[in-house]
Amino acid sequence: MTGAPENQIRNTLENQHLQTAIYTATGRLMSHRRAVVSPEVLPDFQELRTQANLIKKHTIENLDYYLEQFASNVAARGGKVIWARDGAAVVDFLAKLAKEKNVRLIVKAKSMTSEEIELNDRLGRHGLEPVETDLGEYIVQLAHERPYHIVAPALHKTRYEVADLFTERLGVERETEIERQTKIARSVLREKFLSAGIGISGANFLVADSGAIVLVTNEGNARMATTLPRIHVAIAGIEKVIPRAQDLAVFLKLLGRSATGQPLTVYTSFLSGPRRENEIDGPDEFYVVLLDNGRTRLLADRYKRESLYCIRCGACLNHCPVYRKVGGHNYPWVYSGPIGKIITPQYLGVTHDPWLPFASSLCGACEEVCPVKIRIPRLLLKLRSEVVKAKMRDPQSRLERLGFRVWAWVMCRPKLYEMLGAMGSAVFGNGEAWLRRAPGLMNYGPVKAWFSQRDLAPMPARSFRQMWRARRKAAQD
Amino acid sequence: MQKKDDLLSRIRAALGRSVGQPPAPLPPPRLRIPEMSVEARIERFFKNLENLAGKTLLASSLEEARCYVAQLIGEQPAVASNAPLLRECGITDLPTVRSGFACESDLRAACASAAFGITSADYALADTGTLVLFSSPEEARMVSLLPPVHVAVVPRGRILTGLDELLTEVPLPADRSSSMLFITGPSRTADIEQILVRGVHGPGEIHVIVV
Amino acid sequence: MPRVSVFVTCIVDQMFPKVGMAMVEVLERIGYDVDFPEEQTCCGQPAFNTGYREEARKVARHFLKVFRDAEYIVVPSGSCTSMIAHQYRELFAKEPEWLEATNAIEPRIWEFSKFLLEVAKVEDVGARLERVVTFHDSCHGLRGLGIKEGPRRLLSRVRGLTLREMDAAEECCGFGGTFSVKFPEISGGMARTKIDSILRTGAELVVGIDVSCLLQIRGALSRAGSTIGTMHLAEVLAHR
């Protein structure tokens, strides 16, 4: 289909090694999840999903209220909220802050929001040195790549590729043992943590009644980044807010389980403001950047607003048969998989990558596992109709539209439908044997596409309705 | 200020809401606390923590806790938090244990070179094998973070059934501290080929003593 | 005799008429008087799923007209049933008259296996088939209509039949309507993953409730040179 990176997708599909890596990794995440959400171990899992959905719906529908509440509580704890329209506003703020505080080295905990605004590159252009500290993020940063997966950024890299990367970028001796590779990263990054002036994190949740941010990691890098540098800046999309600390009882139970199959992720930090008087450590300054970057546009669309419920667990990627084939780098933006398919067109516009919402078999596995019950297939269908409308004048779309018009016209005329069916049977009839290639002149467009992958059933000599009539007649005789 | 108003007014326009409009009624929080005896809580907490490769000890006396720690750390340097419980156990009196830090930079230097960080915990969660630590003059954040091994001592009465009970007991954690931290097992990653490695940035080993 | 109308779907009508005949045979065997309204064509799903809602609406209105007076409508497809039962509401959200017609038809429309179990309340239809089979869960039946155990219960009553579950029974076969020809390579890749899972079971036959999935699966099996066949559940239950 026009616009899809077909060659790149083909490369992924033909790379046996990569195919195995994606399929195994996502398969493992699926089975880990399944083990912790089964009714035997978590009987109220479905109720938790319902509650999470209700809370998200409520919060999104009253978003201004909860953001104001959040901001005033952050201020009451001595923190500062920065309201940012887009990536440029975030970069401006950070560059100014770094200059004022005389900071060059910045440690970063994993944040998809910062990926979304290409923060690292942009800070680099201001002469700053942002260093990713999640092991997977660090690897993709060294490789100058985008994360491959929301929760497993370096899913596509083998230990040997990591070994080469470390040798090349860090000047260390080639090491292919994963445990030792992790040690290398630990010691390089430990130095960075101890000398960085600013720590940047994302936020898994913003808690309105507390003025707090919640961070969830397994490695402890977010704790490091929010404990050691003097300044902590959290960057979060405005949709991340939840009303009450008590709502975490629902969301934390869902997040770890859905993401990696952990009842709770190893570290959960609930941070409200800078260190208080008498507290021994923690940052002296605490900023929360609330980012719009197109979210208010999504918010205005009642129908598709629920896309903003997402808590970035990545479960829909793991369960998506398309993601499991094409991996994370064939999507046009940082958000891949089913959630990427619904939010990318909304952020970038439906004509930006018009093929995207169509690249789904609509199997519904994503919706089935979504912890906040986003109806992803429904939104994909809606986006498809929007693409069709937006691309009306495009020559190829015109042909397709004409095709469907004619088709609909025929389908409302049973006699004509039957006649055309009989003609089809003459072309695609082949006795009992399946067709291996398209007959003669038919090897074109969708027919050709079908035969590129599979055989086709021969069209029978008689349709059902003809058989039905014959049977009727025989019974009457 | 203007940026704030800009963003908020964009949101209100998108939602069709007006300034100061109260929100629709909020669904009540969902908190479920099961009945569970202290013994059952301890058992559950230990089982879950052990599943995550945590080491556990149910100490019948403070002295037993001290012995365990003494044996564990041997001659190696350790940092203990300022929690009174650790002093009561006699852990702070062990020869290689340094404690009583009130200044961030001293603590940082000590933690960066210590082999063990010893803390108490405000609560533990049976359901998930989790330790809950509030940052305070008694508990700094670094002690449980920088050294490669974390040892925590928890009073048995502080073991809650789970997250729901904690958030019922402490509905507004921010009133208490700038940092509430949950620790559920040792630091880990599976970022390279999904192979589990413990001790990436935080401690790779965790010992919990219930007294 | 209780009466049912069958909506055989366009793909069964044109490509797999035997499936429709098998369904009729089973329904008659358990005592129903079967009617086939000859004006029927398609439910409109191909257009709806490709983003052509106006075209889909035209076809959907036609369907609603044809089946307006049917007492029960039985369909040999989870996907088409789900389209009518769930998506018509979406299509006619702004057309009260047709929305009403949709709401009126929704409780009367039944996927074939669900009809047998929940309306006819029959598990054993007296079938016999001496084959080792595996069952493919079609996505729309599984996730849209909650069809999981039902077909298995029906299969368990077929004499001589052995069911061997595949490890990826719930994984999509990759058909997805126009997806299969818009993204043939991804779709083909998904089909090959599916058939790997089928081959591991050692089954001789794949059974399903949607011929569109079976078309994709059988097409990929055939291309791979496998002789494993496919059968719609209705064909299995009609077999004696």
Image (cartoon, coloured by chain):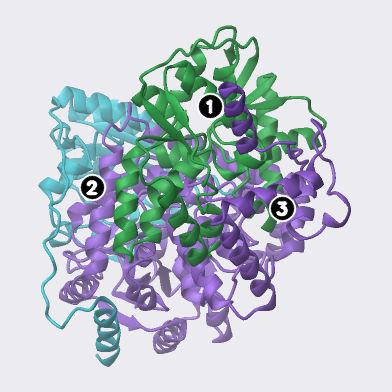
Single out the residue that lies furthest toward the front: A477
* Near-viewer residue (A310 or C186): C186
Chain letter for the green colouring in the rendering = C
Residue A249 tag number: 2
Do discs 3 and 2 belong to a common subunit? no
* Picture layout, residue A42 above or below residue A401: above
The answer for which chain carries disc 3 is C
Amino acid beneath label 3: Pro
| Residue denoted by label 3 | C184
What is the number of the mark on residue C23?
Answer: 1
| CA–CA distance in space, label 3 to label 2 | 44 Å
Q: Residue furthest right?
A: A440
Q: Is residue A352 visible?
A: yes
Please state which amino acid type lies under the numbered disc 2.
Ala
- Against C14, residue A3 (above or below) is below
Counting from the top left corner in percent of width and height, residue C144 is at 42, 42
Q: Colour of chain B?
A: cyan
Circle 2 crowding by C-alpha within 10 Å: few under 14, some 14–19, many from 20: many
**Label 3 vs label 2, nearer the camera:** 3
Q: Are marks 1 and 2 in contact (CB under 8 Å)?
A: no
Label total for image? 3
Identity of the residue drawn at 30% across and 40% down: A46
- The answer for how far apart the CA atoms under marks 1 and 2 are is 50 Å
Numbered disc 3: secondary structure: helix
Residue C193 is marked as: none
Chain A as rendered: colour:
purple
Q: Looking at the image, is A295 positioned above or below residue A204?
A: below
Q: Secondary structure at mark 2?
A: helix
Chain ID of residue with mark 1:
C
Mark 3 vs mark 1: which is more N-terminal?
A: 1
What x and y, as percent, mark residue A78? 20, 76
